[in-house]
Image (cartoon, rainbow, N blue to C red):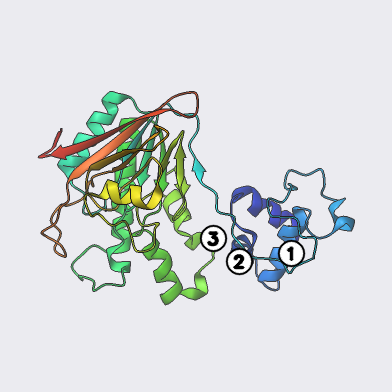
Amino acid sequence: MTKASIARKYRDKYPEYPSHKLARIMYNGNKLTFKDVEAARWALRYIEGKTGASKKKYVKDTPFVKEDARPVNPYNLPESDETIYKPFVFSGHKKIGILSDIHVPYHNIPALTAAITYLKKEKIDGLLLNGDTIDCHRLSRFIKDPKKRNFKLELDTFKALFDVLEKQLKCKIYFKLGNHEIRYQHFLYEKASEIAGIEEFEFENIIKARARGIQMIGDKTVMKLNGLNGIHGHEYIGGISAPVNVARGLYLRGKVSAFQGHNHATSEHSETDMNGKIVTTWSIGCLSELHPDYMPLNRWNAGFAYVELDQNGVDYQFHNKRIHNGNVL
């Protein structure tokens, strides 16, 4: 394959990746073709029509040439590695279930069973795994318990869970990265930096290999479900403070209608501005063990949520559910 052909293959597979990140992946997988990362990056820029007018004419009619979303550069400033921050927009769904903080293999079987049963009855057509689906205990920077399951066994448990969710709910499944999943990336950078960037070792590819058809949503990416915003809950530096409850803390940081997981507690907060607009925030309970060794006394509860999306693309109905002793309240 030519350098341009390789670049087209990778850009087609990873349309949202920044050029520099994708160039690293290309180089690590094709070191006999590219002499360094910059050579791989040049190939990407070539197929996207960004290597000058004289070369753009050869690729101008291909699907990879798009208008650059970055500002015009009249002063010919040096190229930037800035990442364009874009939300993930859900579309084509009427009702989406939300399961947050499952932390396999430390999941709460009665609570998870109750949530699946409820969502089956609601006939959801999409399911969001809203972060910390996998615990990644042995990859943590904290003290590790050698008796806990290793990362491979956690992945095996996740695959078994995914198979159940796919079979029972029969809908598109989305996997949002939370702070526990990011432990893998940090571990790779600190312990095995030489293989960081190799396609086979990317976390999302490890998940996709075990969960066919799953849609990945990146770390710290804001989600849009009509007029509702969604995050895992670790996106704000310093976290979400909870002077009254988690939902109020989310309101104080975000100032828009939104939901989050992360804090393992169900709560709601609403305020009306001077124009009469109601802003409501929600935090969702967890589906993991409620009294782990590292924090047996806490304010956690089991729970899940689902959201009904109006076809006008704006309105929605959010339903936040608590679970107690295996029963949906």
280 shown above or below 239: above
Toward the front, the furthest residue is 274
Circle 1: residue type: Trp
Q: Which mark is residue 199?
A: 3
- Residue type beneath disc 3: Glu
Mark 3, Cα crowd under 10 Å, few <14 / some 14-19 / many 20+, is: some
The correct choice, above or below, for 173 with respect to 47 in the image is above
Q: Which mark is residue 42?
A: 1
Q: Are marks 1 and 3 in contact (CB under 8 Å)?
A: no
Q: Is residue 323 visible?
A: yes
Q: Real-space Cα distance between discs 1 and 3?
A: 19 Å
Disc 3 element = helix
Kind of residue at badge 2: Arg
* Residue beneath the point at 59% across and 68% down: 28
Q: Nearer the viewer, residue 321 or 201?
A: 321
Residue at image coords 43%, 65%: 185
Residue at point 48%, 54% (across, down): 205
**Position in image of residue 137 (x %, y %):** 27, 64
Q: CA distance from mark 2 to mark 3?
A: 9 Å
